[in-house]
Image: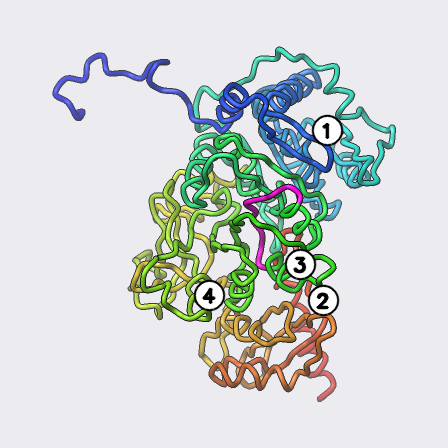
């Protein structure tokens, strides 16, 4: 039975039901803001009329290369205009966008191209050799279209069709392939693959559309923002921010090479108002030298995610004039799906340290999500006591369709009707969620659980520590003990004994690192520390010491 006694004639039709897609944002923006600046890269400027025309011609170009609706088009591009345009141009021809991490090795890129059955690869000249080798490993190699960037020092090699030349020949009147069903796939993104082969995460048009709407609300965006592309556009499609900007008539400022100087230049010269980045980016800004810093007058909103940001870093960012909101999500959730909403009133009266500690929590669900909760091993919600630990579960329209060609992993991820994140967290009495650790990063020392995040937070309060990571190191007595890997700020000095004593003064003895290793930490392209590499180093250290004792 329906909501009304007689619903005869109350059916879906073209007038009252249209498949949701972020492509509609660009169509609307080009109609109402044709002359407004949409995209910036150095001295190059594109209006919304320009951008829509280039997207139309990119879709026509891909169709002329044999790309049919449902095919996959891959990219090996940094944060340059062609990557922004591909966010719209690839789905506008009915295809599925597969943005590939440019820092992956040849074998992994070859696997992704083969697993996703890519028909075409748009490759920046800097990564053309990577594209060539990975494509050559396929039984049916994809067509490579080269995207040169001569201003950045990467002129065309002459070995492949050139993006701009093909674009110039393409049809300005190409008709976009808008989805008939919003469940149709818009993107294929591969997980980092730190254990085994990466999994292909499939996004649909509905999720991408609703992510853009939810982000506008949660980031407090009004018309005409200016977004700096610090989050790689190959990472969760840049948290879907490129799809969002036409919705609010915003300007996307492309940043090819991320540095403190480049960010401060964009803030001063382009009046950037928004950017996202991992805590490592925030750390880079607060530790920037005077030669990199420039003043800016506008309010700047920052989303940070990827790892729990140290409270010390958040406090320093606030002092510089940045309003940082901690968000949380995964590749499987289109990027950020929880936010740490600031509660005015009592929170405003707290000291800076307490405020920063509150900001470090992952928070509550975005408005387009149906649920964010923490569950025990029996799929029951844990108590909101800030002590009991469980696994974060997520439900809503911005959860992936599933893992491509992997129904077993999809079923496991959706067990109990929630997406299982693999992140261990507590829930505070106010309902805010806070990550304790990744399930694989919990250290069990003498039967006690040690949160690597908690130990890292303590270390980051030391003035000499620039970045740190804590992992489990095997121990013959305790099973495992914390081992800290530390990057020291330029010009600063400290010792292993000093840092161990510093943490011991703040945390229980069993949580104190038993060893500190100094040096650069291995990182992904998005700034995440590769803890699996550090765990291997810690195991090797223990094995070497054990051999020495024998």
Q: Specify start and end residues of the magenta stretch as a single range.
A: 269-279
Give yes or no for contact between labels 2 and 1 (Cβ–Cβ under 8 Å).
no
Give yes or no for contact between labels 4 and 2 (Cβ–Cβ under 8 Å).
no
The CA distance from mark 3 to mark 2 is: 9 Å
| Vertical comparison of 400 with 521: above or below | above
At a point 55% along the width and 61% down the height, the residue shown is 317
Q: Which residue is mark 1?
A: 142
The CA distance from mark 4 to mark 2 is: 26 Å
The x, y position of residue 82, in whole percent, is 68, 31
Quadrant placement of the N terminus:
top left
In which quarter of the view is residue 132 placed? top right
The CA distance from mark 2 to mark 1 is: 37 Å
Quadrant placement of the C terminus:
bottom right
The foreground one among 126 and 394 is: 126
The x, y position of residue 156, in whole percent, is 84, 31
Of callouts 4 and 3, the N-terminal one? 4
Of callouts 4 and 2, the N-terminal one? 4
| Vertical comparison of 35 with 189: above or below | above
The CA distance from mark 4 to mark 3 is: 25 Å
In which quarter of the view is residue 83 placed? top right
Q: For this view, does 132 lie left or right of residue 173? A: right
Of callouts 2 and 1, the N-terminal one? 1
In which quarter of the view is residue 293 placed? bottom right
Q: Which residue is mark 2?
A: 520
Q: Which residue is mark 3?
A: 523
Label 3 packing within 10 angstroms: few (<14), some (14-19), many (20+):
few
| Vertical comparison of 358 with 327: above or below | below
Q: Which residue is mark 4?
A: 356
């Amino acid at each position: 039975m329906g909501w009304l006694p007689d619903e005869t004639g109350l059916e879906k039709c073209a007038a009252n039901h249209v498949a949701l897609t972020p492509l509609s944002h660009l169509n609307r923006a080009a109609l109402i803001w044709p002359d407004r600046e949409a995209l910036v890269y150095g001295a190059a400027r594109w209006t919304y009329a320009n951008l829509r025309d280039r997207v139309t011609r990119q879709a026509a170009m891909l169709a002329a290369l044999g790309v049919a609706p449902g095919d996959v088009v891959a990219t090996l591009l940094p944060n340059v205009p062609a990557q922004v345009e591909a966010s719209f141009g690839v789905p506008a021809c009915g295809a599925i966008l597969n943005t590939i991490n440019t820092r992956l090795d040849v074998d992994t890129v070859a696997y992704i191209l083969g697993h996703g059955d890519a028909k075409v690869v748009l490759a920046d000249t800097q990564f053309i050799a990577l594209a060539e080798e990975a494509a050559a490993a396929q039984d049916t190699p994809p067509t490579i279209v080269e995207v040169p960037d001569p201003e950045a020092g990467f002129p065309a090699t002459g070995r492949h069709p050139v993006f701009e030349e093909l674009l110039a020949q393409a049809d300005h009147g190409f008709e976009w392939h808008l989805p008939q069903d919003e469940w149709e796939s818009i993107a294929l993104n591969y997980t980092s693959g730190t254990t085994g082969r990466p999994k292909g995460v499939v996004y649909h048009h509905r999720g991408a559309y609703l992510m853009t709407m939810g982000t506008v609300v949660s980031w407090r965006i009004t018309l005409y923002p200016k977004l700096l592309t610090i989050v790689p556009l190959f990472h969760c499609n840049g948290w879907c921010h490129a799809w969002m900007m036409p919705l609010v008539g915003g300007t996307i400022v492309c940043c090819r090479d991320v540095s403190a100087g480049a960010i401060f230049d964009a803030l001063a010269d382009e009046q950037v108002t928004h950017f996202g980045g991992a805590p490592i980016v925030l750390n880079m800004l607060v530790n920037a030298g005077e030669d990199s810093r420039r003043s800016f007058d506008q309010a700047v909103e920052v989303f940070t995610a990827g790892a729990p940001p140290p409270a010390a870093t958040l406090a320093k960012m606030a002092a510089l004039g940045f309003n940082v909101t901690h968000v949380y999500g995964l590749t499987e959730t289109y990027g950020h799906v929880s936010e740490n909403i600031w509660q005015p009133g009592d929170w405003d009266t707290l000291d800076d340290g307490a405020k920063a500690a509150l900001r470090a929590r992952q928070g509550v669900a975005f408005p387009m999500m149906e649920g964010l909760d923490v569950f025990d091993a029996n799929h029951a919600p844990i108590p909101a006591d800030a002590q009991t630990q469980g696994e974060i579960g997520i439900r809503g329209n911005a959860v992936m369709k599933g893992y491509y060609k992997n129904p077993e992993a999809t079923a496991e991820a959706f067990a109990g009707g929630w997406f299982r994140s693999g992140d261990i967290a507590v829930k505070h009495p106010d309902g805010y969620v806070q990550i304790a650790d990744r399930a694989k990063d919990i250290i069990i020392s003498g039967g006690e659980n040690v949160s690597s995040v908690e130990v890292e937070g303590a270390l980051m309060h030391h003035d000499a520590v620039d970045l740190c990571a804590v992992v489990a190191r095997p121990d013959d007595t305790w099973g495992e003990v914390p081992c800290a890997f530390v990057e020291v700020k330029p010009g600063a000095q400290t010792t292993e004994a000093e840092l161990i004593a510093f943490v011991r003064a703040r945390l229980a003895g069993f949580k104190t690192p038993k060893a500190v290793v100094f040096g650069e930490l291995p990182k992904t392209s998005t700034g995440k520390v590769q803890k699996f590499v550090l765990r291997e180093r810690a195991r090797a250290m223990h094995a070497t010491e054990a051999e020495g004792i024998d």
